[in-house]
Image: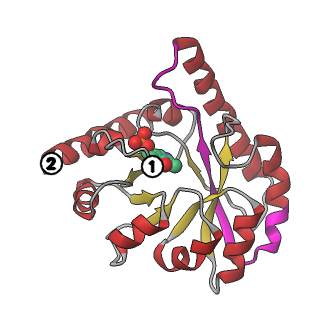
Amino acid sequence: MYELIRDNVQRVLAIIENLRPGEGVKLMAVTKTRTRREAEIAIEAGVNLVGENKVQEAMAKYRDKLAVPLHMIGHLQTNKVKYAIDLFDGIDSIDSERVAEALNRRLNRTMPVMLEVNAGREETKTGLMFEHVRPFLAKAEQWHNLLFVGMMALFPASADKDIEENKKNRDLMKETGELWRMSQKEGFPWAPLNELSMGMSEDFEWALEAGSTMIRLGTALFGARPKTGVL
Ligand SMILES: *Cc1c(COP(=O)(O)O)cnc(C)c1O
Protein backbone atom coordinates (compact mmCIF):
# COMPACT_ATOMS: atom_id res chain seq x y z
CA MET A 1 0.00 0.00 0.00
CA TYR A 2 2.72 2.41 1.03
CA GLU A 3 4.71 2.08 -2.17
CA LEU A 4 1.70 2.09 -4.44
CA ILE A 5 0.39 5.38 -3.06
CA ARG A 6 3.86 6.93 -3.00
CA ASP A 7 4.51 5.93 -6.62
CA ASN A 8 1.12 7.26 -7.76
CA VAL A 9 1.69 10.60 -6.05
CA GLN A 10 5.16 10.92 -7.55
CA ARG A 11 3.89 10.02 -11.00
CA VAL A 12 1.18 12.70 -10.85
CA LEU A 13 3.61 15.31 -9.47
CA ALA A 14 5.89 14.56 -12.43
CA ILE A 15 2.99 15.05 -14.89
CA ILE A 16 2.12 18.39 -13.25
CA GLU A 17 5.75 19.52 -13.44
CA ASN A 18 5.94 18.42 -17.05
CA LEU A 19 2.76 20.16 -18.22
CA ARG A 20 2.97 23.26 -16.01
CA PRO A 21 6.62 23.67 -14.92
CA GLY A 22 7.32 25.96 -12.00
CA GLU A 23 3.73 27.20 -11.65
CA GLY A 24 3.00 25.68 -8.27
CA VAL A 25 -0.12 23.81 -9.37
CA LYS A 26 -1.48 22.05 -6.28
CA LEU A 27 -2.32 18.39 -5.86
CA MET A 28 -5.24 17.57 -3.54
CA ALA A 29 -5.66 13.99 -2.32
CA VAL A 30 -9.37 13.15 -2.12
CA THR A 31 -9.57 10.64 0.72
CA LYS A 32 -13.25 9.67 0.94
CA THR A 33 -13.53 5.95 1.88
CA ARG A 34 -9.78 5.95 2.61
CA THR A 35 -8.10 5.68 5.98
CA ARG A 36 -6.18 8.38 7.78
CA ARG A 37 -3.05 6.27 7.32
CA GLU A 38 -3.52 6.31 3.54
CA ALA A 39 -3.93 10.09 3.63
CA GLU A 40 -0.73 10.42 5.66
CA ILE A 41 1.22 8.32 3.17
CA ALA A 42 0.02 10.59 0.36
CA ILE A 43 1.06 13.64 2.40
CA GLU A 44 4.53 12.20 3.00
CA ALA A 45 4.81 11.61 -0.74
CA GLY A 46 4.07 15.25 -1.47
CA VAL A 47 0.38 16.09 -1.90
CA ASN A 48 -0.39 19.69 -0.94
CA LEU A 49 -3.80 19.27 0.64
CA VAL A 50 -6.51 16.77 1.49
CA GLY A 51 -10.16 16.92 0.44
CA GLU A 52 -13.27 15.20 1.86
CA ASN A 53 -16.85 15.40 0.66
CA LYS A 54 -18.70 14.51 3.88
CA VAL A 55 -18.46 16.28 7.22
CA GLN A 56 -19.14 13.17 9.26
CA GLU A 57 -16.48 11.04 7.62
CA ALA A 58 -13.95 13.85 7.87
CA MET A 59 -14.72 14.32 11.58
CA ALA A 60 -14.15 10.64 12.27
CA LYS A 61 -10.72 10.66 10.61
CA TYR A 62 -9.31 14.13 10.98
CA ARG A 63 -10.28 15.52 14.34
CA ASP A 64 -6.53 15.68 14.96
CA LYS A 65 -5.03 17.98 12.35
CA LEU A 66 -3.10 16.63 9.38
CA ALA A 67 0.21 18.11 8.25
CA VAL A 68 -1.52 19.81 5.28
CA PRO A 69 -4.75 21.83 4.98
CA LEU A 70 -8.06 19.96 4.92
CA HIS A 71 -10.75 21.14 2.51
CA MET A 72 -14.45 20.36 2.16
CA ILE A 73 -15.35 19.53 -1.46
CA GLY A 74 -18.88 18.10 -1.12
CA HIS A 75 -22.28 19.71 -0.62
CA LEU A 76 -22.42 21.25 2.85
CA GLN A 77 -25.68 20.62 4.69
CA THR A 78 -26.65 23.62 6.75
CA ASN A 79 -27.07 21.51 9.91
CA LYS A 80 -23.38 20.49 9.63
CA VAL A 81 -22.03 24.01 9.24
CA LYS A 82 -20.93 24.35 12.86
CA TYR A 83 -18.81 21.18 12.67
CA ALA A 84 -17.38 22.12 9.28
CA ILE A 85 -16.15 25.45 10.62
CA ASP A 86 -14.04 23.77 13.29
CA LEU A 87 -12.77 20.99 11.08
CA PHE A 88 -11.90 22.45 7.68
CA ASP A 89 -9.29 24.99 6.63
CA GLY A 90 -11.28 25.83 3.52
CA ILE A 91 -14.69 25.10 2.02
CA ASP A 92 -14.42 24.70 -1.75
CA SER A 93 -18.06 23.80 -2.34
CA ILE A 94 -20.14 26.94 -1.85
CA ASP A 95 -22.94 25.92 -4.21
CA SER A 96 -25.78 28.29 -3.26
CA GLU A 97 -26.62 31.52 -1.46
CA ARG A 98 -28.23 29.45 1.26
CA VAL A 99 -24.95 27.70 2.08
CA ALA A 100 -22.99 30.97 1.91
CA GLU A 101 -25.44 32.63 4.28
CA ALA A 102 -25.47 29.77 6.78
CA LEU A 103 -21.69 29.63 6.86
CA ASN A 104 -21.25 33.38 7.11
CA ARG A 105 -23.71 33.60 9.99
CA ARG A 106 -21.87 31.01 12.07
CA LEU A 107 -18.32 32.25 11.47
CA ASN A 108 -16.46 34.62 13.74
CA ARG A 109 -13.36 34.70 11.56
CA THR A 110 -12.61 35.01 7.85
CA MET A 111 -12.74 31.68 6.06
CA PRO A 112 -11.26 31.02 2.62
CA VAL A 113 -13.92 29.49 0.39
CA MET A 114 -14.51 28.61 -3.25
CA LEU A 115 -17.52 29.05 -5.42
CA GLU A 116 -18.68 25.77 -6.96
CA VAL A 117 -19.63 25.71 -10.62
CA ASN A 118 -21.73 23.02 -12.31
CA ALA A 119 -19.92 23.24 -15.64
CA GLY A 120 -21.85 20.42 -17.27
CA ARG A 121 -25.24 21.79 -16.15
CA GLU A 122 -26.04 18.37 -14.69
CA GLU A 123 -29.18 18.00 -12.60
CA THR A 124 -27.51 15.34 -10.48
CA LYS A 125 -24.81 17.78 -9.39
CA THR A 126 -24.81 20.87 -7.20
CA GLY A 127 -23.13 24.14 -8.09
CA LEU A 128 -23.90 27.36 -9.94
CA MET A 129 -24.59 27.57 -13.66
CA PHE A 130 -22.13 29.75 -15.59
CA GLU A 131 -24.59 32.63 -15.99
CA HIS A 132 -25.19 32.81 -12.23
CA VAL A 133 -21.54 33.22 -11.33
CA ARG A 134 -21.25 36.96 -11.89
CA PRO A 135 -24.43 37.94 -9.99
CA PHE A 136 -23.41 35.61 -7.17
CA LEU A 137 -19.97 37.18 -6.88
CA ALA A 138 -21.45 40.67 -6.85
CA LYS A 139 -23.74 39.61 -4.01
CA ALA A 140 -20.92 37.97 -2.08
CA GLU A 141 -19.83 41.32 -0.67
CA GLN A 142 -22.50 40.95 2.03
CA TRP A 143 -20.92 37.78 3.48
CA HIS A 144 -18.17 39.52 5.42
CA ASN A 145 -16.66 36.33 6.84
CA LEU A 146 -16.20 34.62 3.48
CA LEU A 147 -13.21 35.28 1.25
CA PHE A 148 -13.72 33.73 -2.17
CA VAL A 149 -10.20 32.54 -2.98
CA GLY A 150 -11.19 30.36 -5.89
CA MET A 151 -13.63 28.50 -8.07
CA MET A 152 -14.19 24.74 -8.03
CA ALA A 153 -15.66 23.24 -11.20
CA LEU A 154 -17.47 19.92 -11.67
CA PHE A 155 -17.71 18.12 -15.03
CA PRO A 156 -19.62 15.17 -16.43
CA ALA A 157 -17.78 11.87 -15.93
CA SER A 158 -15.53 11.00 -18.87
CA ALA A 159 -14.97 7.29 -18.37
CA ASP A 160 -18.00 5.88 -20.20
CA LYS A 161 -18.13 8.50 -22.94
CA ASP A 162 -17.15 8.29 -26.58
CA ILE A 163 -14.48 10.43 -28.20
CA GLU A 164 -16.93 13.07 -29.39
CA GLU A 165 -18.48 13.55 -25.94
CA ASN A 166 -15.08 13.70 -24.33
CA LYS A 167 -14.03 16.41 -26.73
CA LYS A 168 -17.03 18.38 -25.43
CA ASN A 169 -15.75 17.97 -21.88
CA ARG A 170 -12.37 19.20 -22.98
CA ASP A 171 -13.91 22.32 -24.54
CA LEU A 172 -15.97 22.83 -21.41
CA MET A 173 -12.78 22.93 -19.37
CA LYS A 174 -11.38 25.64 -21.62
CA GLU A 175 -14.61 27.63 -21.25
CA THR A 176 -14.44 27.24 -17.49
CA GLY A 177 -10.86 28.52 -17.54
CA GLU A 178 -12.09 31.60 -19.43
CA LEU A 179 -14.98 32.14 -17.02
CA TRP A 180 -12.52 31.99 -14.13
CA ARG A 181 -10.16 34.54 -15.69
CA MET A 182 -13.04 36.89 -16.48
CA SER A 183 -14.38 36.59 -12.94
CA GLN A 184 -10.94 37.41 -11.55
CA LYS A 185 -10.92 40.56 -13.66
CA GLU A 186 -14.04 41.84 -11.89
CA GLY A 187 -11.55 42.77 -9.19
CA PHE A 188 -13.93 42.25 -6.26
CA PRO A 189 -11.83 42.60 -3.07
CA TRP A 190 -13.91 39.83 -1.44
CA ALA A 191 -13.28 37.49 -4.37
CA PRO A 192 -9.63 37.38 -5.50
CA LEU A 193 -10.28 33.93 -7.05
CA ASN A 194 -6.64 32.90 -7.22
CA GLU A 195 -7.45 29.21 -7.53
CA LEU A 196 -9.22 27.18 -10.16
CA SER A 197 -9.89 23.71 -8.71
CA MET A 198 -10.58 21.58 -11.76
CA GLY A 199 -9.66 18.05 -12.83
CA MET A 200 -10.17 14.58 -11.33
CA SER A 201 -8.46 11.23 -11.92
CA GLU A 202 -9.80 10.64 -15.39
CA ASP A 203 -9.42 14.14 -16.82
CA PHE A 204 -6.75 15.99 -14.86
CA GLU A 205 -4.35 16.30 -17.79
CA TRP A 206 -6.97 18.19 -19.81
CA ALA A 207 -7.66 20.34 -16.77
CA LEU A 208 -3.98 21.20 -16.47
CA GLU A 209 -3.95 22.21 -20.13
CA ALA A 210 -7.00 24.42 -19.54
CA GLY A 211 -5.38 26.39 -16.70
CA SER A 212 -6.37 24.54 -13.52
CA THR A 213 -4.34 25.53 -10.46
CA MET A 214 -5.48 22.62 -8.29
CA ILE A 215 -6.40 19.05 -9.23
CA ARG A 216 -8.44 16.75 -6.98
CA LEU A 217 -7.48 13.10 -7.21
CA GLY A 218 -8.82 10.03 -5.44
CA THR A 219 -8.71 6.96 -7.67
CA ALA A 220 -5.44 7.91 -9.42
CA LEU A 221 -3.64 7.99 -6.06
CA PHE A 222 -5.36 5.28 -4.01
CA GLY A 223 -6.94 2.95 -6.58
CA ALA A 224 -10.64 2.33 -7.25
CA ARG A 225 -13.03 3.06 -4.40
CA PRO A 226 -15.13 0.22 -3.00
CA LYS A 227 -18.60 0.47 -4.59
CA THR A 228 -20.92 0.94 -1.61
CA GLY A 229 -23.68 2.72 -3.47
CA VAL A 230 -23.58 5.67 -1.08
CA LEU A 231 -21.04 7.71 -2.99
C1 LIG B 1 -14.51 12.01 -5.28
C2 LIG B 1 -14.23 13.37 -5.76
C3 LIG B 1 -13.05 13.66 -6.48
C4 LIG B 1 -12.03 12.61 -6.87
O1 LIG B 1 -12.54 11.67 -7.75
P1 LIG B 1 -11.60 10.62 -8.51
O2 LIG B 1 -12.31 10.34 -9.78
O3 LIG B 1 -11.51 9.42 -7.63
O4 LIG B 1 -10.28 11.26 -8.72
C5 LIG B 1 -12.85 14.97 -6.87
N1 LIG B 1 -13.72 15.95 -6.58
C6 LIG B 1 -14.85 15.72 -5.89
C7 LIG B 1 -15.77 16.86 -5.61
C8 LIG B 1 -15.14 14.42 -5.45
O5 LIG B 1 -16.27 14.20 -4.77
The residue labelled by disc 1 is 230
Residue 147 lies, with reference to residue 45, above or below; the image says: below
Q: Position of residue 64 (x, y in %)?
A: 33, 78
Q: Quadrant of residue 210?
A: top right
Q: For the residue labelled by badge 2, is the local secondary structure a helix, a strand or a loop?
A: loop
- Whole-number angstrom distance, CA of label 1 to CA of label 2: 24 Å
Q: Is the CB of mark 1 within 8 Å of ligand 1? A: no
- Which residue is found at the position 76% from the left and 41% from the top? 130
The reply, left or right, for residue 38 in relation to residue 111 is left
Mark 2 and ligand 1: say if the CB distance to the nearest ligand atom is below 8 Å.
no
Which residue is label 2 attached to?
Answer: 1
Question: Is 86 rendered above or below residue 230?
Answer: below
Q: Nearer the viewer, residue 104 or 110?
A: 104
- Note whether residue 32 is visible: yes
**Front disc: 1 or 2:** 1
Part of the protein shown in magenta? 139-162
Residue 85 lies in the magenta-colored region? no
The image position of residue 221, as x and y in percent, is: 30, 44
Magenta segment: does it hold 146? Answer: yes
